[in-house]
Image (tube, rainbow, N blue to C red):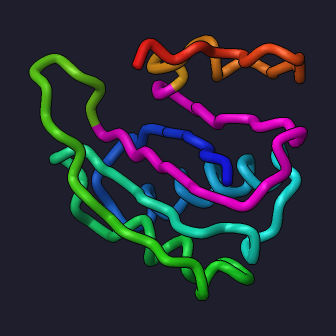
Amino acid sequence: MRAIRGATTVSENTVEAMREVVTELLDELENRNQFQPRDMISVTFSVTRDLDAIFPAAIARARPGWDNVAMLDVQQMHVEGSLQRCIRFLIHAYLPASASIHHIYLRNAASLRPDWSLPQIQTSQPAVKSKV
C-alpha cells in the first residue's frame, strides 16, 4: 500500500471554481501516476474553513471508476496565517513498491511542498525523508 498526497488552491468559494481546480488536480494525479481507480483504497479530501460550496468527493465521484472508492471530506485545521482556499487530498492505493509516486501540488499550494511540486526522479532513496 502506498500514499499519494496533493493540494491546490481555488480563487473563490463557488461550485464552478472548486469543480475546475479539483478536476485539474485529479487529472494531473491520473496523468502523472500509473494507477487506476480500482487500485485506490480510500481518498480523504480536506478543505480550509473558507471553502464550503461543494464537497470535493462529490466532484471526484463523477469521474469514471471513482464512484466505488471510499472517500471522506473533512475541514482542515485552521492555523492563523496558513494558506487560504486550499483543497488537499491523501490517497491510499495498492501500488508496487517500485512504482514512482508523483505528489501533485498545484497553483498556490505548490508553496506547501516545493520539493514535491517539481518533477520527481525515481531513485533508490526516498525523495523526501520523514521527520516523524
Looking at the image, is 59 positioned above or below residue 27? below
Foreground pick, 60 / 123: 123
Q: Based on the picture, tell me whether residue 99 belongs to the magenta stretch.
A: yes
Where is residue 7? Give x, y as percent: 50, 39
Horizontal side of residue 36 vs 49, given as left or right: right
Looking at the image, is 119 positioned above or below residue 42? above
Where the C terminus falls, by quadrant? top left
Horizontal side of residue 103 vs 113, given as left or right: right
Foreground pick, 41 / 49: 41
The residue under the point 67% across, 59% down is 93
Where is residue 32? Give x, y as percent: 83, 43
Horizontal side of residue 38 vs 61, given as left or right: right
Where is residue 25? Give x, y as percent: 62, 49
Where the N terminus falls, by quadrant? bottom right
Foreground pick, 102 / 59: 102
Where is residue 60? Give x, y as percent: 55, 71
The residue under the point 64% across, 37% down is 104
The residue under the point 50% across, 73% down is 59
Q: What residue range appears in magenta?
A: 85-109
Looking at the image, is 8 positioned above or below residue 130? below
